[in-house]
Amino acid sequence: MSYDNSCKFLAEEYPTDFVRWLLGMETEDINVLKTELFLEPIRADSVTFLQTKNRILHIEFQTEPVSKPPIPFRMGDYSFRLKRKYKCPVTQVVIFLQETTNEIAFTEEYRDETTIHRYRVIRLWEQDSALFLNNRGLLPLAPLTKTDSPTALLNQVAQTVATISDIREQQNITGCLGILAGLRFDKDLIRQFLPEDIMRQSVIYQDIVHKEAFKLVRLMINGRFGEIDSSLMQQIENLSAEQLEALVKVFFSFSNINDLQAYLDTENS
């Protein structure tokens, strides 16, 4: 899911680049619609909705062609829900990140006995890398595009990222690049081109660390104390990654759930 999260971060951080690429239009008037607005969002981490003046751009990022419900059905479902809520045209694009021969990656419609719904599909491995190299928000996707020399392309992207003067932006772009490049390159090669210390400072990398730490803590709590109150679990989720790691170290010193609550009260005081 970290691949999808990285793409979602890029689309929401650089909506102008994605609207220019996918809608072929220049505009600064773009709103990011939160997926929480929709009932039962499906794979929310992979979905981005961008609203321009008179159109909604719905982007789905996919690493795997098989999902439940199937991608074609999901696109039809979202289209009707978006049109009903916002009463404007909707352009839908499914972007496949990793090369596959599965027919779903070559399917651009949902069809049943009474309905035909069409959407666009983009297979990154067929795309010209030039466009991605010239747009900062698309830069981390560039290593997944069409090339005769993947390693040379990765090197070119890494050198371009290194020229970004804003250190925070460079960290975030590097973090996304390191994650997405993992779909095509092994870790050792990626480390040759991308400074690991910069990747670790990125928002997306820190988010992944936090989610993994929280997942571990939740498993430990459920295994020892069973299901706990949702408000208590929310307190735990609000801890930083460092606090979660510290909690793991002292967890087995707790005799009961009251000890855990007391520890959290101390951390939040």
Image (tube, helix red, strand yellow):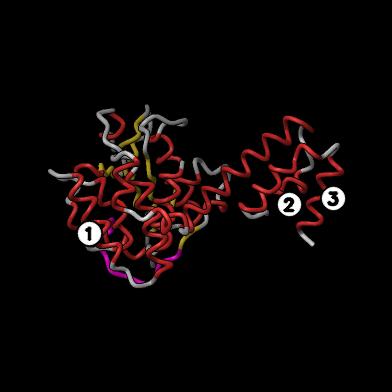
Find numbered disc 2 in the image and state the secondary structure of the residue it sits on. helix
Give whichever of 199, 100 is nearer the camera: 199
Q: Which amino acid, mark 1?
A: Leu
- Residue 82 appears in view: yes
The reply to whether discs 2 and 3 touch (Cβ–Cβ < 8 Å) is no
Residue 262 numbered mark, or none: 3
Give whichever of discs 2 and 3 has the lower sequence position: 2
- Residue 265's x, y, as percent? 81, 55
Q: Quadrant of the C terminus?
A: bottom right
Give whichever of 201, 29 is nearer the camera: 201
- Disc 2: CA contacts within 10 A as few (<14), some (14-19) or many (>=20): some
Find numbered disc 1 in the image and state the secondary structure of the residue it sits on. helix
Give whichever of discs 1 and 2 has the lower sequence position: 1
Of circles 2 and 3, the one toward us is: 3
Q: Residue at x 28, y 42 (%)?
A: 121
- Residue 80's x, y, as percent? 45, 45
Q: Which amino acid, mark 3?
A: Ala
Looking at the rendering, the stretch of residues picked out in magenta corresponds to 22-31
Residue 133 numbered mark, or none: 1
Q: CA distance from mark 1 to mark 2?
A: 42 Å
- Judge left or right: residue 217 versus residue 64: right
Q: Residue at x 71, y 46 (%)?
A: 247
Residue 96 numbered mark, or none: none
The image shows a total of numbered marks equal to 3
The residue at which mark 2 appears reads as 235
Q: Which amino acid, mark 2?
A: Gln
Of circles 3 and 1, the one toward us is: 3
Question: Is 6 one of the magenta-colored residues?
Answer: no
Question: Is 30 one of the magenta-colored residues?
Answer: yes
Give whichever of discs 3 and 1 has the lower sequence position: 1
- Residue 201's x, y, as percent? 47, 59
Q: Residue at x 51, y 40 (%)?
A: 42
